Image (cartoon, grey):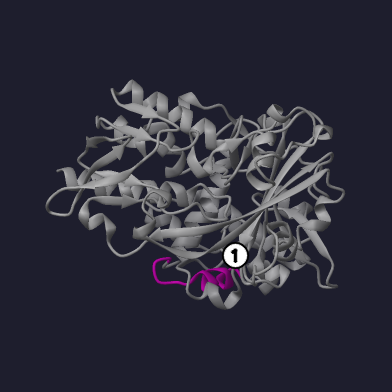
């Protein structure tokens, strides 16, 4: 957010009460122990050197295509970060016999031919769908036409996602697989009736296009060396200061300043009030202006092996749809290690997260994590160490922006950077509009 404004000529003052990155920062293993076990806790020496770990408290992977990537480039952040490829993009499913399996998310014809997930009769149909996606261009009406013998122009603005899939004569299990994988719609067939086909097609095409952004992509995702939380904050500091602004961490925030009309006009820190045209705040700084919208539990695990059934991935993104694990909320898993500089050689750092569905009364965070993330545990065993944290999710209450205060929502449980980018763009547009 700060870098977006700075790149547009705005003078920005960025303050953090904690280390750079705030509640979304990266921490070493000793800091993680102190945060989750207790202030006097010491990291297990068997895990290796504590400073060899960079644990993202809210990990997010970036799809290597689309406006989210462009946002980092346009704001000047990209050149200050070392993004590296994520090895695998995977999805979890239940087999017809009730056993579990993990597979690469289908993205090309080779995947379709090799996979065991698709019914044999659907493979040729999915290859035709993928071929159509390759040539589809939303700006070219001619590419909306599909079909081999009988041609039909697809009205993607009016069709539902389910109707679009049925045009290709796909079986229900294939529809769910493609929608939850490439499409990112982790929902049931019934819910796909409410998804516009054009949105589904955009998502699937973006997924495919991400493989072409950089050479040798084996998944559509990239992730920065050293973790996203702190590296993003450090890059932001460079952009802000390069544009004439200032950035300070571990600086206490006393209060938000308001003018006589009740509009936010600055911030008070250590007895000094700094005036500003707009104030952007995380929920922790304005607890009276936000409301809780649920809780997220995150499990942090250190392994001496790649997660089981994850194709020996050096790093991977794994989605466990709620429909496949008997839950109402999906589970998101990210695993990496030395390839991204988040763990020492020979170790994997795995983070799993989901919304809490049951009661937390009388239970530790680890007990809640084991209950809510039960589907993840078998792929982690044996673990060297597991730690867990419960964090509330906050969003602005009412129209806070109407009085000049822009509140950034809490990071959710997903691995996608899209939500973060959308929140940033929305606030950026509101700030620019109010200053014109």
Identify the residue under disc 1: 186
Towards the viewer: 327 or 356: 356
Towards the viewer: 15 or 305: 15
Q: Position of residue 281 (x, y in %)?
A: 35, 47
Q: Residue furthest left?
A: 260
Q: Secondary structure at mark 1?
A: loop
Rendered residue at 35%/59% (across/down):
288
Q: Is residue 166 magenta?
A: yes
Towards the viewer: 171 or 367: 367
Q: Residues within 10 Å of mark 1 (few under 14, many from 20)?
A: many
Q: Position of residue 108 (x, y in %)?
A: 65, 49
Position of 314 with respect to 162 (left or right) is right
Q: Position of residue 165 (x, y in %)?
A: 57, 69
Which residue range is magenta in the image?
A: 156-168
Position of 394 with respect to 296 (left or right) is left
Tell me which corner region of the image, top left, top right, bottom left or bottom right, holds residue 315. Answer: top right
> How many marks are shown on the rendered structure?
1
Position of 103 with respect to 225 (left or right) is right
Q: Position of residue 422 (x, y in %)?
A: 40, 50
Rendered residue at 74%/36% (across/down):
42
Relative height, residue 45 to residue 396 (above, below): above
Rendered residue at 81%/51% (across/down):
380
Picture quarter with the N terminus: top left
Towards the viewer: 232 or 289: 289
Q: Is residue 173 magenta?
A: no
Picture quarter with the C terminus: top left
Relative height, residue 110 to residue 288 (above, below): above
Tell me which corner region of the image, top left, top right, bottom left or bottom right, holds residue 239. Answer: top left
Position of 2 with respect to 21 (left or right) is left
């Amino acid at each position: 957010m700060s870098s977006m404004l700075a790149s547009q000529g705005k003078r920005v003052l960025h303050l953090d009460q904690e280390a750079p990155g705030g509640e979304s920062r990266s921490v070493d293993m000793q800091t993680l122990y102190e945060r989750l076990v207790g202030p006097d806790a010491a990291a297990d020496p068997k895990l290796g050197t504590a400073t060899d770990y960079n644990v993202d408290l809210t990990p997010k992977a970036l799809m290597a295509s689309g406006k989210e990537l462009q946002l980092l480039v346009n704001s000047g952040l990209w050149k200050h970060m070392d993004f590296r490829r994520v090895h695998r993009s995977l999805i979890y499913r239940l087999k017809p016999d009730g056993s579990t399996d993990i597979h690469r998310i289908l993205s090309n014809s080779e995947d379709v031919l090799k996979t065991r997930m698709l019914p044999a009769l659907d493979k040729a149909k999915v290859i035709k769908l993928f071929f159509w996606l390759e040539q589809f261009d939303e700006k070219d009406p001619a590419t909306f036409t599909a079909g081999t013998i009988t041609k039909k122009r697809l009205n993607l603005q009016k069709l539902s996602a389910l109707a679009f899939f049925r045009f290709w004569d796909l079986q229900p299990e294939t529809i769910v697989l493609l929608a939850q994988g490439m499409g990112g719609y982790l929902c049931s067939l019934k819910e796909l009736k409410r998804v516009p086909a054009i949105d589904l097609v955009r998502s699937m095409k973006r997924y495919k296009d991400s493989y072409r952004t950089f050479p040798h992509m084996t998944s559509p995702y990239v992730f920065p060396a050293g973790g996203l939380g702190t590296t993003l904050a450090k890059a932001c500091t460079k952009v802000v200061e390069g544009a004439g602004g200032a950035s300070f961490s571990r600086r206490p925030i006393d209060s938000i300043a308001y003018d006589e009309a009740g509009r936010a006009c600055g911030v008070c820190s250590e007895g000094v009030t700094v005036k500003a045209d707009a104030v952007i705040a995380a929920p922790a700084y304005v607890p009276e202006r936000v409301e809780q919208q649920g809780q997220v539990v995150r499990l942090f695990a250190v392994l001496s092996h790649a997660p089981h059934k994850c194709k020996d991935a050096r790093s991977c993104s794994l989605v466990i749809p709620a429909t496949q694990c008997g839950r109402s909320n999906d589970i998101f898993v990210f695993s990496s290690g030395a390839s991204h500089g988040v763990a020492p050689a020979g170790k994997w750092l795995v983070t799993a997260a989901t919304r809490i569905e049951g009661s937390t009364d009388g239970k530790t965070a680890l007990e809640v994590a084991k209950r809510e993330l039960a589907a993840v545990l078998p792929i982690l065993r044996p673990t060297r160490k597991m730690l867990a944290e419960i964090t509330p999710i906050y969003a602005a209450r009412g129209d806070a922006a109407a009085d000049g205060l822009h509140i950034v929502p809490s990071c959710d449980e997903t691995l996608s950077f899209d939500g973060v980018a959308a929140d940033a763009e929305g606030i950026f547009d509101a700030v620019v509009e109010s200053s014109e």
